[in-house]
Image (cartoon, rainbow, N blue to C red):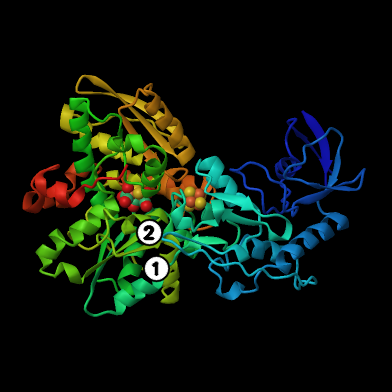
């Protein structure tokens, strides 16, 4: 171990630790910008400089290693002045439009400016005038707001294994861009939005559909129904200052009604439907030993990644549409029929934790199912715009018919949840007995084995696309032992989605996941096949899982 002194306090840390880590050990906070705990070190913004007292040198604490006997001052006048100058230089060519900015209130540059007591910028830098890339359908890039911290570049390469973004040009002209500066919609980007999640400013944000949804709500000829993804229940509250993981299902339903939606439904209903279709699809494949491993396809970022990188494994993807798209298809068929509303007048809005869902709804195969996708953040903006006091709303319920749901559906929103939900139904259907504990955690890759119908079923779960690639490489090489693989593009699953409240962190995501697990364990029905409205849907309308009617409405085929 290494012993050093920081701000007069002694600390002992492992060799190889950085000064930033050592300071945090002592509870001393040093501001950072390009640093991110989940990513490799960069050391470029120099906002985290500290002074080595003996030599008088300034060191970027996020990358500088500890040395024995070091004396560090994190707040000497020299360190503070340098830190301020470095932030002022960033501000000198940053647009001054905080008031109208998407990240006003959650911008890290804004926070640091405030915390460092910077009230005016003495340097008048040349402002850049670079074009905005809103080629869509999911994300908007505004290079003028980019501070070149490289967090987006690193998350895309290191966590997602996509590398859609890179630094191009040099010096003052340096920018983050796609390869050949192509529109983002034309590159291999998975639309996962992890770049937006780690961006400290508004250089990358979702493409907003808020105006479209207001217009639909104000159009009397439209019957506007809304579905909310499983994970929103434990994340939306954060936008209103509530603790991550607080279950706000009832307040959310109340707020959606006040926004003017004609019916307030849940994607969870369709997650149960997905389990009925996909669970039976897996049983068919497993019995016939065909297209194994069966790979989930409810995550649109993952599907796009698969199309780009593993086109040879497309037949292994489940043909079941995602819960979002199944819901939308049912809202314009069964629901239209039951309520005697013309399907062409039904406008279906999906509230998703995800930017890739905006892409999913535009896919040729699924076009027309969903009319608009709002992220958790966009929904919160609408609630705030309406002046609704979210935290004091009395709980309300989802509307009948497409509002009934189970714990199995709720856990879709966290890594491993789809697998557990599917196996609850598969195990009962084949063995007539309930699934035991799978013991799944929160890691990037997990596996489990269980006995079903006298045979061993091996399952694997990946979250984060770089992790998925590891499992898929094994499948491609022919040495995978798995029969069922769940992939979610975002680290930790939809609770870590690119459209979720900011800021986020591992701890916050774990709390969100716990919130979903708490709903599952709250005494509600826990198995998709026991959802009474799903039973009714099959009795009244669909017939049986994988039947002709289901096939037409609820399944799709992806391109190689
Ligand atoms: Fe998800 Fe899914 S779980 S993909 O994370 O299968 O987005 O929450 O809605 O469709 O149900 C997202 C969440 C969501 C779908 C479901
Ligand atoms: Fe990379 Fe995902 Fe951002 Fe696309 S959306 S650039 S894949 S991090």
| Residue at 82% over, 54% down | 75
Seen in the picture, residue 429 relative to 134 is either above or below; the reply is above
Give percent across and percent down for residue 461: 39, 34
Name the residue beneath numbered marker 1. Answer: 209
> Residue 263 at what x, y percent from top left?
24, 67
Residue placed most toward the observer, 519 or 114: 114
Q: Is residue 172 above or below residue 470?
A: below
Q: Quadrant of residue 199?
A: bottom right
Quarter of the rendering occupied by the C terminus:
top left
Q: Nearer the viewer, residue 477 or 69?
A: 477
Residues at circles 2 and 1 in contact by the CB criterion of under 8 Å: yes
Residue at (56%, 65%) from the top-left corner? 103
x, y percentage for residue 469? 44, 35
Name the residue rendered at 27%, 55% in the picture.
Answer: 366
Residue to which mark 2 is pinned: 358
Quarter of the image for the N terminus: give it.
Answer: top right
Q: Is residue 505 above or below residue 18?
A: below
Is 124 displayed left or right of 312 in the figure? right
């Amino acid at each position: 171990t290494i012993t050093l002194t920081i701000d007069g306090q002694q600390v002992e840390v492992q060799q190889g630790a950085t000064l930033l880590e050592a300071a945090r050990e002592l509870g001393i906070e040093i501001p950072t910008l390009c640093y991110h705990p989940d990513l490799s070190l960069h050391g470029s913004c120099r906002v985290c400089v500290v002074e080595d007292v003996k030599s008088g040198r300034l060191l970027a604490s996020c990358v500088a290693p500890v040395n024995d006997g070091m004396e560090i001052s994190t707040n000497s006048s020299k360190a503070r002045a340098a830190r301020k100058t470095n932030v002022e230089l960033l501000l000198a060519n940053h647009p001054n439009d905080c008031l109208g900015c998407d990240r006003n209130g959650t911008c890290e540059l804004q926070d640091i400016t405030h915390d460092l007591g910077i009230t005016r910028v003495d340097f008048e830098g040349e402002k850049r005038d670079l074009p905005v890339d809103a080629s869509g359908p999911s994300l908007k890039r505004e290079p003028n707001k980019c501070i070149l911290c490289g967090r987006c570049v690193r998350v895309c390469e290191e966590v997602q294994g996509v590398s859609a973004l890179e630094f191009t040009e040099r010096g003052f002209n340096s920018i983050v861009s796609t390869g050949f500066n192509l529109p983002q919609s034309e590159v291999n980007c998975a639309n996962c939005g992890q770049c937006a999640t780690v961006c400290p400013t508004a250089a990358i944000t979702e493409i907003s559909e808020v105006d479209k949804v207001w217009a639909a709500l104000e159009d009397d000829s439209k019957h506007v129904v809304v579905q909310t993804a499983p994970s929103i229940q434990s994340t939306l509250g954060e936008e209103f200052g509530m603790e991550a993981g607080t279950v706000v299902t009832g307040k959310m339903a109340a707020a959606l009604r006040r926004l003017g939606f004609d019916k307030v439904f849940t994607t969870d209903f369709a997650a149960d439907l997905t389990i009925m279709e996909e669970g039976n699809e897996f049983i068919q494949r497993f019995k016939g030993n065909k297209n194994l491993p069966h790979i989930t396809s409810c995550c649109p970022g993952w599907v796009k990644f698969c199309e780009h990188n593993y086109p040879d494994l497309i037949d292994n993807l489940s043909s079941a549409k995602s819960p979002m798209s199944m819901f939308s298809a049912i809202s314009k068929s069964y629901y239209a029929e039951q309520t005697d509303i013309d399907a062409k007048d039904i406008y279906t809005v999906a509230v998703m934790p995800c930017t890739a869902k905006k892409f999913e709804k535009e896919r040729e195969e699924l076009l027309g199912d969903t009319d608009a996708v709002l992220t958790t953040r966009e929904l919160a903006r609408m609630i705030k715009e309406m002046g609704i006091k979210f935290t004091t709303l009395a709980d309300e319920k989802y509307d009948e018919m497409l509002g009934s749901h189970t714990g199995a559906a709720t856990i879709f929103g966290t890594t491993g949840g789809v697998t557990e939900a599917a196996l609850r139904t598969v195990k009962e259907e084949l063995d007539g007995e309930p699934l035991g504990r799978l013991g799944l955690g929160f890691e990037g890759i997990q596996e489990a084995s269980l006995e079903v119908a006298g045979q061993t079923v091996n399952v694997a779960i990946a979250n984060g696309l770089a992790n998925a690639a590891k499992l898929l490489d094994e499948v491609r090489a022919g040495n995978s032992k798995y029969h069922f693989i769940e992939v979610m593009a975002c680290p930790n699953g939809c609770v870590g989605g690119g459209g979720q409240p900011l800021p986020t962190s591992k701890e916050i995501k774990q709390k969100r996941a716990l919130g979903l697990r708490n709903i599952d364990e709250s005494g509600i029905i826990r198995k998709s096949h026991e959802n009474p409205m799903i039973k009714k849907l099959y009795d009244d309308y669909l017939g049986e899982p994988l039947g002709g009617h289901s096939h037409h409405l609820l399944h799709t085929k992806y391109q190689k």
